[in-house]
Image: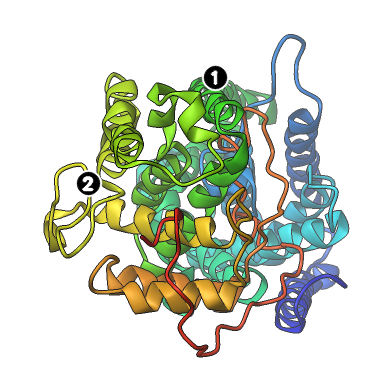
Amino acid sequence: MRGLPAAARGYIGCAALAAALCAAPAAGLGADAPWSSALALALLYGLCEQLRRSPPPGGRAPHGTGPGASGGFPAGWAGPVLLAGVFLLPPPLAALAAVPGALIAPAAPRSAATRRLWHAAELALACCAAAEVFRLLGPHPLSAPRFPLLLLPAVAAAAAFCAVLAALDGGVLATAERHPVRTAWRGLLTRSLGPHLVHGLAGLMMVVLWRSPYGPPAALLVLLPMYLSCWVFDRYHRERAAHQATIRALVQAVDIKDRYTRGHSERVGRASVMIARELGLPEDRMEALRFAGILHDVGKLGVPTRLLRKDGPLTPEERRVIELHPEYGHEIVRGIGFLEEARAAILHHHERLDGSGYPYGLRGHHIPEVARVVAVADAFDAMTSTRSYRRARPVPAAVAELRRCAGAQFDPRMVRALAASLDRHGWQPDLVTAAGPESGAGYVPPADAGDGLPAPVVPVRVPPVPHPERAGRDGTR
């Protein structure tokens, strides 16, 4: 835990202690407790997690259907196993059954032990809470003839399971990833509630078959359709990864053509998401902004290379040619359906609030919001990057220039959001971005969204500074 902030270490430690206290009463249960069922479910859940680590020949094991694909939620087809334990076992045993599988679950190499500890703690707490809800609402003893009476308690328990996980994950986002408190929990519950209700019903089906004359082996049949559905979901993610690889190829083509701005597109995408997160935009808008930031200069593919690599000042005619690149970019991505909102940013990211921008001279709020975000991110990275015609500015000087131009060129709300995010997360202009298909087309967020255990980032404080001179060829002109 050394690389984590003190608040995150304390938060994870308290969660682990609370999980231990929830599971501790299991030691006092007598021999008549369902120990064999607890052991069988713990082994089954561990097997599910191991299958994620060891994919079948010719493919990969399915991912989860919720945030847990990278964080604390269980694998999509293993969730019913945990919820079956919630319905079958006393709360302490339900908590205990989740621990072994969580401790052997796949984890990123960095701080792997801490990630597994957190994974085990939150699952144990969620299972214990859900089992308490089920015991409070459900008829006892469980039996197949009472199956319809178990539907409402099972749904309530699955909702409680999901709510506890969402609450705990929001806390780790706030403490470890330094997300704003007002947005750390946003969307966690709504995104995962549906899948977990489905998992709850599947877990209830496992319980009914478990208690039927066919016995526990029949319960395994429920996992087969869950596995197949997760396989289909995995195929969707592969298709999405192919889209991102296409984006990456376009960005690399721009970087090869304009060598002076190599890496600029990924950094603008990263800064755009920082602004979007500070504004509290929903995940789908953040994704659109990430694509827009990465592809905002794709129209440079239609600009003569000699102009992009010219060391001296541009003539008015040459500047008019370069100013066509937003329209070129809009045409290049016109046929890509998932870039519908990003196209507006690609076309309008050089518009100005006072109407003196290009290509159409839009004014104020007639400029799409995504374009106003990308305009600020683009100008910020242009000023903080070394170019052939000038040295990079310090981050505080660049932010001061953005503030000076706010209201005339930039949307003041976007400038404030970027400054606040820089103050919280810092800026890493030399961050190496991944180019693999799962990397989000080269995007690396300021903190690894998902498991809440990022490397420490030294914040960049943005004090008031004297106004620097206006830029020459960068994005503030």
- Is residue 189 depicted above or below 28 in this figure? above
Q: Nearer the viewer, residue 127 or 405?
A: 405
Secondary structure found at label 2: loop
Q: Residue at x 48, y 40 (%)?
A: 294
Kind of residue at disc 1: Leu
Q: Which residue is mark 2?
A: 358
Q: Residue at x 56, y 78 (%)?
A: 396
- The span from disc 2 to disc 1 (Cα, nearest Å) is 50 Å
Q: Residue at x 61, y 41 (%)?
A: 260
Q: Position of residue 122 (x, y in %)?
A: 67, 64
Instruction: Specify how the rendered protein is coloured.
Output: rainbow
Q: Position of residue 248 (x, y in %)?
A: 55, 28
- Classed neighbour count for the residue bearing mark 2: other residues with Cα under 10 Å, few (<14), some (14–19), many (≥20): some
476 lies left or right of 253: left
**Quadrant containing the N terminus in the rendered view:** bottom right
Q: Position of residue 148 (x, y in %)?
A: 35, 43
Kind of residue at disc 2: Tyr
Asked if residue 32 can be seen in this view, the reply is no
Q: How many marks?
A: 2
* Residue 55, picture quadrant: top right
- Is residue 186 depicted above or below 238 in this figure? below
- Is residue 134 depicted above or below 142 in this figure? below
Q: Which residue is mark 1?
A: 228
- Is residue 299 depicted above or below 385 in this figure? above
176 lies left or right of 246: right
Q: Nearer the viewer, residue 12 or 341?
A: 341
